[in-house]
Amino acid sequence: MKLKAHEVDGWVNKLKPEDAPALVLVYGPDRGGVHETAKALRLAYLGDAYDPLQYVALDESALAGQAGLLADEAAAMPMFGDHKLVHVNGGNAAVQAAVTFFLAKMDTGIAASGAAMVIVEADNLRPTAPLRKAAETHKTAMALPCYALEARDIGRLIRQVLEQENYRIDAQAMDLLTARLATDRGVIHRELERLVLYKGVRAAKSEPGMVTGDDVEAALGDQAQGDFDRLIDNVALGRLDEADRALARLEAAGTNAASALAVARLHFQTLHLALGQIERGTAQTKALSVFRPPLHFRRKPLVEQQMPLWSSGKCARALEILNAAEKACRGGTGGLAQAQAGNALLRIARAAQR
């Protein structure tokens, strides 16, 4: 069985152990989203006070040459607890073989459903990938895709996480956060944890606290968005070497390709809008006010330097390149997706020089 990406959170939130499938495959280019979804599944299935013997973690290397190990672990129920979870990290050929063996056991009735659940965390998988096809087509399995978040989804996630910590957020702070944060759920959760630690833990029964724009600036500063800003500004200014180094820093920090492309798309959409206003006679100072949140005083001169290098038509072509690259990254694996993203951004940087 399979779900669409926007259906995943609702399904996970409603999951009950007695109704859980035998195997859940969580996959996609949003590695943070894959990890957070798997963590939410573990919490829904085992609760937060499970016996250590109820949980077994297996790396894909542990399954090499041992296709039956996964099924054996799922069948070996612990002395305490009604349920067991086997968590597999990876999606190589060994994992495919182990999943095929396990699902075949389910078909024969040898492995009892409901007693144990298997979670498989994998990178992005094409529709034809055997592991994905097995999870999507088997009656006791489920496939959950995780793609980079859109801006509206980022806002919803911010409110959800902060409400769980008994905090509300004002409009200015929301604008700052949605502009600063990447589209990777893992990055978002880490940055929000830093923000909550800065504000302080609040008791659930106390009045909700308020997160302001000043809190966001103080807690996160430019760190969350700084590397993205450096990348995008260097691309828009046609600084190829600097753009290449900024992209390498983001990759080394574990940022996925889709996140960089999404931030670049947002910048060029806004730049396109500002240039369109200038071409219709609006003063540049007023046109720059379309950027939300307002440009930081340190960054504003860099964006002003970009204006003469671009036109609204040229921005439209850059957006076509970015949209095509985002689509390609959704169907590519980690290394290939990074290469496609880098190629698209450097193409745009070269265009800025013309």
Image (cartoon, helix red, strand yellow):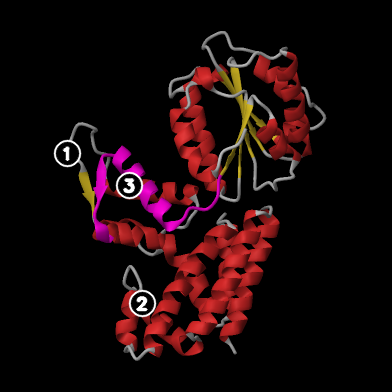
Amino acid, disc 1: Glu
Marks 1,2: beta carbons within 8 A: no
Label 2 amino acid? Arg
Kindly identify which residue carries mark 3.
Answer: 159
Which mark identifies residue 111? none
Vertical side of 224 occupied by 116: above or below: above
| First of labels 1, 2 by sequence position | 1
Query: Any magenta on residue 282?
Result: no
Give the residue drawn at x 42%, y 81%: 303
Estimate the x, y position of residue 144 in percent, counting from the top left. Answer: 58, 38
Q: Is residue 117 visible?
A: yes
Query: Where are the magenta residues, as a range?
Result: 146-172
Q: Residue at x 60, y 83 (%)?
A: 351
Question: Dot 2: few (<14), some (14–19), or many (≥20) neighbours within 10 Å?
Answer: few
The quadrant where residue 3 appears: top right
Q: Earlier in the sequence, mark 2 or mark 3?
A: 3
Is residue 244 among the parts visible in the rendering? no
Amino acid on which the number 3 mark rests in the picture: Arg
Residue 298 - label = 2
Q: Quadrant of residue 119?
A: top right
Residue 161: image x %, image y %? Answer: 36, 43
- Residue 166, quarter of picture: top left
- Mark 3 and mark 1 in contact? Answer it, CB < 8 Å: no
**Disc 1 marks which residue?**
207
Instruction: Find the distance from the CA under tag 1 to the CA under tag 2.
Output: 37 Å
